[in-house]
Each structure stands twice: as structure tokens, then as C-alpha cells.
Amino acid sequence: MPRNIRLSEKLLVIGLSLIFLFMIVQDWVPLGPLNDVQAILQESTVNEIFIKSTVGAGQVLLILIGVLCYVGKRYPIIIKLWLIIHQISIFVGALFDWWFPYFFGYGADQRTQRYQEMFGQTHSFLPEMNGITPNTLHVLFHSILFTCILLTIYISFTRKSTSARQQQIVRSS
């Protein structure tokens, strides 16, 4: 059966691929002013960075594989739930690590010095609040992740267009 891949699914695959790439390179590959690999290596051991990168990239790879298996097809309810819940769980972690300390000061005391040492020399466009300044690379990552969550919810709760269903009926006749 041919797949009818919607634009929203293509955008989701692109977004998840960018997140996967982010997870792989963020702590290992120098990206000019977007990251500071040396500062990260001074704050964490190579083993800690490897584990963090492997777990992060592995999670996103599983999500990406889940999407790729069903792209252009009907997603089973368990896959819909898993895709939404897993991505939201990652996003909640980002909220607690970056955005709650930034906006409300929640946990900022424990993060300020470490974030300043790891990300203080990286590019950011947001003003400092509560001693935290989310850098541009993390703002992009979190924005893409949020967009992927919205796309997943959209894909999960909408059906293929009528013309796509009619085309499938015609093809199978």
C-alpha cells in the first residue's frame, strides 16, 4: 500500500532529525559561538558526556524510528500516546532545567554557576534573568522540540484528507 505522507509528518521527521543531530553534536563538535566544548569538558567527564549524549540521542532515535515506521499510515493509539508522552517528558525536563530557573528562579541557585561556566561564552540573545541566560543553541533545540510536540499532537488527532482516502480507495479498486 502506498504511503500518503502529509506535510506535517515531513516537518516532524525534519524536526526530530535536527534534534537527533543536536543531541549527537552539542557537547562534542565545536560549533563556533553556539557551544563551548572545552568548557563542557571541564565541567563533566568524558564518560558523563558520553552517557548523556547516548541516552539523549537514543531517546530521540527511538521516537524518530516510531514516526518513520508509521509515516503516511494510520498510527496505532499506543504509538500516538508514546510519541506524545515521550516528547512531552523530554520537554518537561527542559522546562525544569532551563525555563523555570530562567523565568521564576526555581532551582537557579544550583544551576547559575555551572551554566555560566559551561555556556557563559556561547551566543545568546535573551537577557539574563535570575542568573541564567539560555544560549541560542538550547533555545533552538527547545523550540524545535515544542514544535515537534505540536506536530505530533496534530498528526495524532487529525485524519488524512478525504482526497487522500479516496485516492487509496481508487488505487485498491
Image (cartoon, helix red, strand yellow):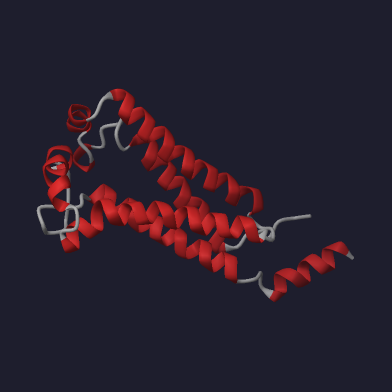
Residue drawn 32% across the image and 52% down it: 94
Can residue 11 be seen here? The reply is: no
Residue drawn 33% across the image and 54% down it: 142
In the rendered view, tell whether residue 128 sits above or below residue 168. above
Considering depth in this image, is 105 or 20 the residue closer to the camera?
105
Which residue is outermost to the bottom? 162
Residue 124 position in % (x across, y down): 17, 51
Residue 8 position in % (x across, y down): 54, 63
Which residue is outermost to the top? 46
Residue drawn 20% across the image and 35% down it: 36
Number of numbered labels in the structure image = 0
Quarter-of-image position of residue 145: bottom left
Quarter-of-image position of residue 162: bottom right
Considering depth in this image, is 155 or 115 the residue closer to the camera?
115
In the rendered view, tell whether residue 57 sits above or below residue 150. above
Considering depth in this image, is 120 or 84 the residue closer to the camera?
84
Judged left or right of residue 119, residue 85 is right
Which residue is outermost to the right? 173
Quarter of the image containing the C terminus?
A: bottom right
Can residue 90 be seen here? The reply is: yes
Quarter of the image containing the N terminus?
A: bottom right
Judged left or right of residue 128, residue 49 is right
Residue drawn 17% across the image and 27% down it: 42
Residue 39 position in % (x across, y down): 17, 32
